[in-house]
Amino acid sequence: QVELVESGGGLVQPGGSLTLSCVASESMFEFNSMAWYRQAPGNRREFVARILLDGTTTYEDSVKGRFTASRDTTKNTVYLQMNSLKPEDTAVYYCNAVLWSDGTSYWGQGTQVLVSS
């Protein structure tokens, strides 16, 4: 059973920065991809950013240029550096990983990000 543990959420003022972390219980090379999603109250969970096995990153349009996904394979950890945060970035942020062996998708428990003055 794969476990994903997010951390780093909190309260930040508009224009501020936060870095989220997601630690996986398995080697990152077991996953086709690791991604960040978010869900605001009353909204569907939406894609934010993804890192593929080869290190390629993709982003949702509204976060391009502000958010950066990265990874440390020695720590089985992916990060989401979030800059120039806006109130509309407020959401619970979830880490996702997809096993390359069978396509099973795993989710972390989420970490709350609140952007407010």
Image (cartoon, rainbow, N blue to C red):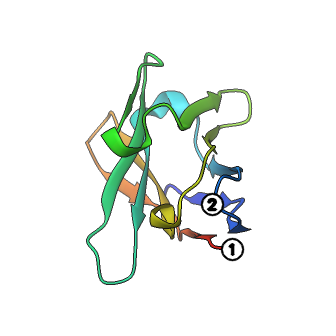
Q: Position of residue 85 (x, y in %)?
A: 59, 53
Q: Position of residue 40 (x, y in %)?
A: 40, 74
Q: Amino acid at mark 1?
A: Ser
Helix, strand or loop under label 1:
loop
Helix, strand or loop under label 2:
strand
Q: Residues within 10 Å of mark 2 (few under 14, many from 20)?
A: some
Instruction: Note whether 104 is above or below 94 in the view shown.
Output: above
Q: Residue at x 71, y 53 (%)?
A: 16
Q: Amino acid at mark 2?
A: Val
Instruction: Note whether 117 is above or below 14 in the view shown.
Output: below
Front residue of 100 and 45: 45
Q: Quadrant of residue 28?
A: top right
Give the residue number, with chain letter if any, for mark 2. Answer: 5
Q: Residue at x 63, y 60 (%)?
A: 5
Q: Nearer the viewer, mark 1 or mark 2?
A: 1
Q: Position of residue 59 (x, y in %)?
A: 38, 35
Give the residue number, with chain letter if any, for mark 1. Answer: 117
Q: Residue at x 70, y 65 (%)?
A: 13
Residue 60 visible (yes or no): no
**77 lies left or right of 2:** right
Instruction: Note whether 89 is above or below 98 in the view shown.
Output: below
**107 lies left or right of 79:** left
Q: Residue at x 40, y 57 (%)?
A: 106
Task: Say how many tags the image has.
Answer: 2
| N-terminal-most mark, 1 or 2 | 2
Q: Position of residue 101 (x, y in %)?
A: 31, 35
Residue 84 visible (yes or no): yes
Q: CA distance from mark 1 to mark 2?
A: 28 Å
Front residue of 104 and 37: 37
